[in-house]
Amino acid sequence: MAALPEDIHLIERSSNFTVRLLSRDEGWGDERTHHTAHDLVLRPILSVAEECWAYGIDPDSAPFEAARTILRKEGRRYKVGLSGDPVTGHELFWNARGGKRGTIAIAVELSRLDVEAVFQHCREAFVFNNYRSGHNTAAITYAQRKIEGKTHLVFCLPRNNGFEWMEVFAPQPVIFSLYAKALELCDGAET
């Protein structure tokens, strides 16, 4: 599937696109569920991540409690520990939706990630006109600053839709080849 001209225009402005990780039914299921996408998409990203941050998480919330052992407060955000297994037993943290958790931003060096291995387990790729609406402003600012160096990409899990989809931020012109690869590999893939 080729990118639509309006998608290219939006990507030129925002340097991002979105990949769907779960079906709509899965996305609105039990937030404590361990999904196949945790193993086939999230783990490979986390295994090569330089850093991972949680923005806007309430320390009195159930998602915070689910991740208490992997979170460390630094300023107004929380650093997510990447050693060991940051997924199993912490699914509520990754899956929380409806603004219960805030945005999670994961930074990865472009050269370290096998994007084909990740995208082949996503369901579809698309572009949002207003991608900022599902994220904490500080997380979007972090993602945009991180890609300025042209060596990193940043994955953002939204505060509103939990683990149903994630934004992919990358420097230009790399973002266009990543979007083309995502359209090729993840359209209709089962996770």
Image (cartoon, rainbow, N blue to C red):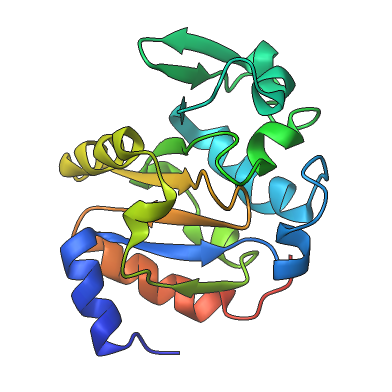
> What is the x, y in percent for residue 26?
77, 61
Residue drawn at the location 51% of the way across and 43% of the way down = 159
> What is the x, y in percent for residue 50?
42, 28
Residue drawn at the location 73% of the way across and 72% of the way down = 190
Residue drawn at the location 32% of the way across and 63% of the way down = 130
Residue drawn at the location 56% of the way across and 36% of the way down = 46
Q: Is residue 68 left or right of residue 179?
A: right
With respect to residue 14, does 113 lie above or below?
Answer: above
Tell me which corner region of the image, top left, top right, bottom left or bottom right, holds residue 43: top right
Callout count: 0
**Looking at this view, is 90 or 160 the one in front?**
160
Q: Is residue 107 left or right of residue 175?
A: right
> What is the x, y in percent for residue 110?
35, 46
Q: Quadrant of the C terminus?
A: bottom right
Q: Quadrant of the N terminus?
A: bottom left
With respect to residue 121, does 3 lie above or below?
Answer: below
Tell me which corner region of the image, top left, top right, bottom left or bottom right, holds residue 143: top left
> What is the x, y in percent for residue 149?
17, 39
